[in-house]
């Protein structure tokens, strides 16, 4: 079966599935995970655990392997498992069985459903950035299912965006911007995520577009959406090239960079901002969206510069301690 066929089947399951899942342990709001399990195929836990535990205590592996679809993994167990994956030889069949539980924890963190998985997610991103995970340990169908699941989860968060005025480090837009930016390091199809977002099929997608574009138009102290950073509360506009987790020496995959160089033009950004404002007529965010749209002529030089610079910043291998910034 091809990756495209798998994506089509996964999409069919997403549209046909309902909250009344036969998996009684599965939360209604995470029926998308049920679709992931369905697309995963007949994957069961391995009969024997050969995975070495990094700290030589394999109790977490036994707890994880006893999980069944729909159950939540303990965050500490998932954290321990990321260390096994990073620093010992990987048992492929165990990885294939446990990845959906890892993805569920990642989703709960991104969607703000739980705060307990944050530490695990920081290391999980580093695991997924290892090309051997997809090239050696997973087949094409499984890789495609992971991509689809992550894209749809990010789109869920984007669809739920509300508001065009934020102060402090806990502002919700940081979550989806960070996930979007990090996805470009992990999977080579960020164009599919970007295109689904910029079709502006929901108010949330339109609001998210205005949030993002404001970071391309304004300097930190002029941005009307994100109040400037302060020592007491943090904040400031999201950094559009900063990756989540422990991805200190990573960069966007080249297909994603190539896509963004063509997609991020002043004309396309301007058109998207105009359509977003039109989409928000009657919404509380409309007036601010129009104000930002009308500022395009005043911010055109900054916008032109940043549309060119952002792909360049994303394709640069980031290193710990190296500070990147806009030229203007």
Image (cartoon, grey):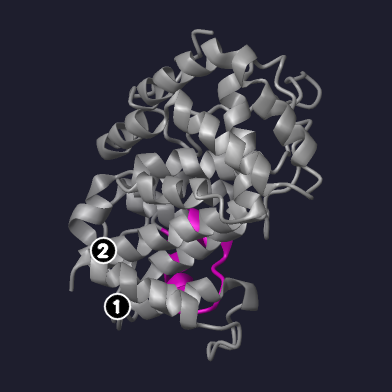
Question: Quick check: 62 left or right of 156?
Answer: left
Q: Nearer the viewer, residue 214 or 96?
A: 214
Q: Would you name the residue on which mark 1 appears? A: 46
Residue 316 is at least partly visible in this image: yes
Question: Quick check: 224 left or right of 315?
Answer: right
Q: Would you name the residue on which mark 2 appears? A: 91
Q: In the rendered view, tell whether residue 94 sits above or below residue 275.
A: below
Q: Please give the name of the residue rendered at 81% of the width and 23% of the height, measured from the top-left corner.
A: 232
Q: In the rendered view, tell whether residue 258 sits above or below residue 129.
A: above
Q: Secondary structure at mark 1?
A: loop
| Residue 117 picture location, percent across and down | 59, 54
Q: Nearer the viewer, residue 82 or 271?
A: 271
| Residue 34 picture location, percent across and down | 48, 78
Question: Quick check: 305 left or right of 166?
Answer: left
Residue 89 is at least partly visible in this image: no
Q: Nearer the viewer, residue 49 or 215?
A: 215
Which circle's residue, 2 or 1, is located before the other in the chain? 1
Residue stretch in magenta: 57-79
Q: In the rendered view, tell whether residue 4 sits above or below residue 310.
A: below
| Residue 95 picture location, percent across and down | 32, 64
CB under 8 Å between callouts 2 and 1?
yes
| Residue 239 picture location, percent across and down | 56, 27
Q: Please give the name of the residue rendered at 61% of the width and 56% of the height, measured from the top-left corner.
A: 202
Whether residue 141 appears in magenta in the rendering, the answer is: no
Whether residue 64 appears in magenta in the rendering, the answer is: yes
């Amino acid at each position: 079966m091809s990756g495209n066929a798998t994506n089509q089947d996964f999409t069919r399951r997403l549209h046909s599935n309902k909250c009344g899942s036969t998996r009684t342990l599965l939360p209604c709001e995470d029926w998308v995970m049920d679709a992931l399990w369905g697309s995963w195929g007949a994957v069961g836990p391995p009969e024997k655990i050969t995975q070495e535990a990094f700290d030589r205590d394999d109790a977490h592996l036994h707890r994880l392997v006893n999980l069944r679809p729909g159950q939540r993994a303990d965050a500490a167990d998932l954290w321990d498992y990321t260390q096994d994956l990073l620093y010992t030889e990987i048992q492929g069949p165990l990885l294939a069985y446990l990845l959906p539980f890892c993805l569920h924890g990642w989703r709960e963190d991104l969607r703000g459903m739980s705060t307990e998985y944050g530490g695990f997610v920081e290391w999980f991103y580093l695991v997924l950035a290892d090309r051997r995970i997809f090239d050696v340990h997973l087949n094409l169908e499984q890789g495609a299912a992971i991509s689809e699941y992550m894209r749809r989860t990010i789109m869920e968060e984007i669809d739920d965006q509300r508001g065009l005025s934020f102060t402090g480090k806990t502002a919700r837009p940081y979550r989806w911007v960070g996930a979007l930016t990090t996805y470009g390091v992990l999977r080579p199809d960020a164009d599919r995520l970007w295109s689904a977002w910029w079709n502006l099929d929901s108010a949330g997608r339109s609001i998210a577009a205005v949030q993002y574009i404001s970071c391309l138009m304004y300097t930190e102290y002029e941005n009307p959406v994100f109040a400037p950073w302060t020592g007491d509360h943090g904040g400031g506009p999201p950094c559009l090239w900063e990756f989540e987790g422990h991805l200190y020496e990573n960069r966007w995959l080249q297909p994603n960079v190539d896509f963004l160089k063509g997609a991020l033009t002043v004309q396309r950004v301007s058109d998207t901002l105009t359509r977003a404002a039109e989409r928000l007529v009657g919404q509380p965010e409309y007036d601010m969206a129009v104000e930002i749209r009308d500022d395009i002529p005043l911010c055109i030089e900054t916008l032109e510069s940043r549309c060119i610079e952002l792909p360049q910043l994303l394709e640069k291998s980031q290193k710990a301690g190296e500070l990147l910034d806009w030229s203007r």
